[in-house]
Amino acid sequence: MSTDSARAARFEMVAAVVYEPLQRYLGRRAAPADAADVLSDTLTTVWRRLESVPTDDPLPWCYGVARRALANNRRGDQRRERLQGRLQVVGRADMAASADPQDIVEQTDPELSAAMQHLTDSEREVVRLWAWERLEPREIAEVVGLTSNAVSVALSRAKRKLAEELGGRQDPADAGQETGRHAVENERSGE
């Protein structure tokens, strides 16, 4: 097999593993019109840097690439918006047609959405990678460029902040169990 054929075969194997998870990841973070473009940019980068892609678990590395491609896309959007402002162009047609991924969270759970706003941007990203993408702290560390320990601390801190903001709401992971203040009150009342 030639070098080009081997490279193409490796890329196809990586793409088969990462395509759908990256599509979901970007779909949650970008307007539908932008998500496809950012996915294309991500896969282009994966192709260019194929030698750097880990062979054992390429997904966290590719999430990191997608995260940076999304940031580049957002910066491009901001530059275009500033230019449009200078040109006194009112509105963008694609803004009205696209749904903000945050709107989905606000519609399904406004309390959680409000609680998430009390987190820093980096804490929100760590929580989203953990909850939405189901990544482990070591994988999140690779995506965001931190150590596993720093991610674990940030995730723990973010969960604690969310628990405080949400008050007595029970964590879905603890379904069927009483925790915190409610468990103590029930013990005292003899329930």
Image (tube, helix red, strand yellow):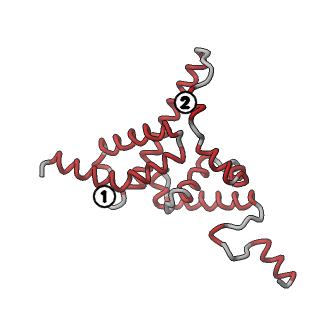
Location of residue 161 with respect to 98 vertically, above or below: below
10 Å neighbourhood of mark 1: few (<14), some, or many (≥20)?
A: few
Location of residue 82 with respect to 39 vertically, above or below: above
Rendered location of residue 145, percent (x, y):
47, 50
Question: Is disc 1 placed on a helix, strand or loop?
Answer: loop
Image-based side of 108 in relation to 122, left or right:
right
Residue that extends furthest to the left in the rendered view of this protein: 1
Give the quadrant of the C terminus: bottom right
Q: Mark 2 or mark 1: which comes first in sequence? A: 1
Rendered location of residue 161, percent (x, y):
70, 57
10 Å neighbourhood of mark 2: few (<14), some, or many (≥20)?
A: few
Identify the residue shown where x is 74% and y is 57%. 165
Question: Is disc 2 placed on a helix, strand or loop?
Answer: helix
Q: Quadrant of residue 100?
A: top right
Residue assigned mark 2: 94
Rendered location of residue 153, percent (x, y):
59, 60
Amino acid residing under circle 1 = Thr
Residue assigned mark 1: 55
Amino acid residing under circle 2 = Asp
Residue that extends furthest to the bottom in the rendered view of this protein: 190
Identify the residue shown where x is 12% and y is 48%. 2
Circle number at residue 159:
none
